[in-house]
């Protein structure tokens, strides 16, 4: 004998089967994971995927930077003042040439009077000088001269037999050889008369100039 099953009963049976499957899946836990192909990374170790983009420093703000990190020209310098370079003036080198002192040549002075050729002899000079005040009474001799210039004569007289280092007597005479007269006789014969009246050659002998 056939039994009629209501349609609502069939729907309830299908729902019960679905709920039973869901319960079984929940009891089994997580679905199986695929097998590992490499060892797991240690905790705290970074990876290439964890690094920041190229040019970025962790912890620094990236606002205002172009995409990809720091620009190729580097970070801008802020707050560094710039000062103008001091220009040191250059001066041309000057050389100072010391003044050249012209060499002055003094004109040659008069030449001393030469030895007499036609003048008085040494004996004539000793004759006129002997016995004058200041003239030694010892025998005398003419050691130099007489030298003549015009009518003037100059002679150097010394005591006969004396050393060459002994003091000599200077004699200036004037006049013709036979009648000469003493103008000056002594250790210094450069008197005013000799300087003003005697020829240059005699003055040079008597005064040195």
Image (tube, grey):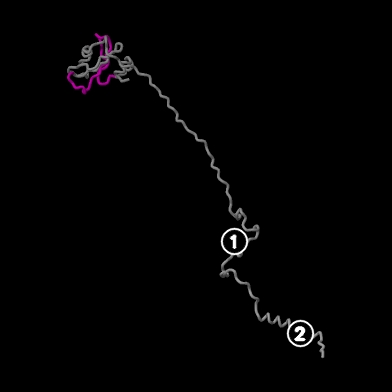
Observer-nearest residue: 161 or 174?
161
Residue 49 drawn above or below residue 127: below
Q: Which residue is drawn at 53% across and 39% down?
A: 90
In the drawing, does residue 20 fall left or right of residue 141?
right
Residue bearing the label numbered 2: 13
Could you tell me residue 9's position as x and y percent? 79, 86
Image quadrant in which you'd find residue 44: bottom right
> For mark 1, what is the residue?
57
> For the residues carrying marks 2 and 1, which lies nearer the camera in this image?
2
Instruction: State the extent of the magenta-drawn residues as a range.
Output: 160-189
Is residue 85 a member of the stretch shown in magenta?
Answer: no
| Crowd tier of the residue under label 2, counting other residues whose Cα lies within 10 Å: few below 14, some 14–19, many 20 or above | few
In this view, which residue lies farthest toward the front? Answer: 1
Q: Of the residues under marks 2 and 1, which one precedes in the sequence? A: 2
Asked which quadrant contains residue 116, the reply is top left
Q: What element carries label 1?
A: loop
Helix, strand or loop at label 2? It is helix
182 within the magenta span = yes
Quarter holding the N terminus is bottom right
Q: Residue at x 36, y 19 (%)?
A: 108
Q: Is residue 40 above or below residue 195?
A: below
Residue in view at x 58 percent, y 50 percent: 82
The image shows residue 27 at horizontal and vertical percentages of 66, 81
Furthest residue in direction bottom, as rendered: 1
């Amino acid at each position: 004998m056939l039994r009629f099953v209501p349609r609502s009963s069939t729907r309830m049976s299908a729902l019960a089967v679905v709920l039973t499957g869901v319960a079984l899946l929940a009891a089994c836990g997580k679905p199986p994971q695929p097998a590992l192909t490499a060892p797991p990374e240690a905790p705290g170790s970074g990876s290439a995927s964890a690094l920041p983009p190229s040019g970025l420093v962790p912890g620094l703000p990236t606002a205002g930077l172009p995409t990809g990190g720091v620009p190729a020209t580097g970070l801008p310098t802020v707050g560094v003042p710039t000062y103008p370079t001091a220009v040191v003036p250059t001066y041309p080198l000057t050389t100072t040439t010391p003044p050249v002192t012209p060499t002055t040549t003094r004109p040659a002075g008069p030449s001393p009077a030469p030895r007499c050729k036609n003048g008085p002899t040494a004996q004539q000079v000793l004759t006129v000088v002997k016995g004058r005040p200041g003239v030694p009474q010892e025998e005398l001799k003419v050691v130099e001269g007489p030298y003549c210039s015009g009518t003037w004569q100059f002679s150097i007289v010394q005591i006969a037999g004396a050393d060459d280092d002994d003091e000599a007597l200077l004699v200036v005479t004037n006049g013709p050889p036979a009648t000469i007269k003493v103008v000056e006789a002594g250790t210094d014969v450069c008197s005013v008369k000799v300087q003003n009246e005697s020829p240059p050659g005699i003055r040079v002998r008597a005064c040195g100039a």
